[in-house]
Image (spheres, rainbow, N blue to C red):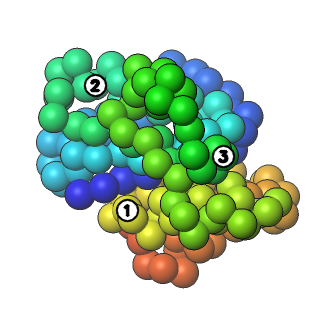
Amino acid sequence: MVACFIGHRKIAVTNELCERIRTTVLDLIDNQGVDTFLFGSRSQFDELCLKIVTEIKEIRPHIRRIYVRAEYPYISADYEKYLLTFYDETYMPESIIHAGKAIYIERNRRMIDSSNICIFYYLENYTSNCGTYKTYLYAHKNLKTIIDIALM
């Protein structure tokens, strides 16, 4: 099974939030069969989740961390080698290459399409114009299992 992480660019990182993420990820791995995690970029939430999943990979080495790029459809071998020091795989969906300004929203939608479970950090008091809100609605409309870490 596959889970993806999507959240606001700026978040309040606390020990409590880190523990909620850690507990949620371990539950998904141990009790729900999730073995693949998709990550985007450009947010503190993504960075924090990658750090925690990487720590968990030390004790659950079978899990995979995949970076779904929204930039650079073609990358050099050196850049790919660099990315693979953090991730187990990286790719950019061909369907988003010409998405223009909406490329991050389109990338997140492809991540949702590829996932069984979507782990969000979404606060309702953010503007309805933000990408996380639009992506949250997309996941909800497509009947994905949504875990909102911000509300736990």
**Figure quadrant of residue 60:** top left
**Figure quadrant of residue 85:** top left
State the residue at coordinates (71%, 59%). 103
Q: Which mark is residue 56?
A: 2
Residue 128 percent coordinates (x, y): 81, 65
Q: Which mark is first along the chain, 2 or 3? A: 2
Judging from the image, what secondary structure is the residue with disc 3 in?
A: loop
Specify few, some or many for label 1: CA neighbours under 10 Å numbering under 14, 14-19, or 20 or more. many
Q: Is residue 68 left or right of residue 89?
A: right
Residue 52 in sight here: no
146, above or below 74, in the image: below
Toward the viewer: 111 or 98? 98
Q: Are marks 1 and 3 in contact (CB under 8 Å)?
A: no
Judging from the image, what secondary structure is the residue with disc 2 in?
A: helix
**Residue mark closest to the camera, 1 vs 3:** 3
Q: Is residue 85 left or right of residue 25?
A: right
Q: Which mark is first along the chain, 1 or 2? A: 2
Residue 115 in sight here: yes
23, above or below 55, in the image: below
Specify few, some or many for label 3: CA neighbours under 10 Å numbering under 14, 14-19, or 20 or more. some
Marks 2 and 1, Cα distance to the nearest angstrom? 20 Å
Residue 50 percent coordinates (x, y): 45, 30
Q: What residue is shown with label 1?
A: 115
State the residue at coordinates (57%, 46%). 74
Toward the viewer: 23 or 60? 60
As shown in the figure, which amino acid type bears the numbered disc 2?
Answer: Ile
Toward the viewer: 2 or 31? 2
**Residue mark closest to the camera, 2 vs 1:** 1
Q: Which mark is residue 71?
A: 3
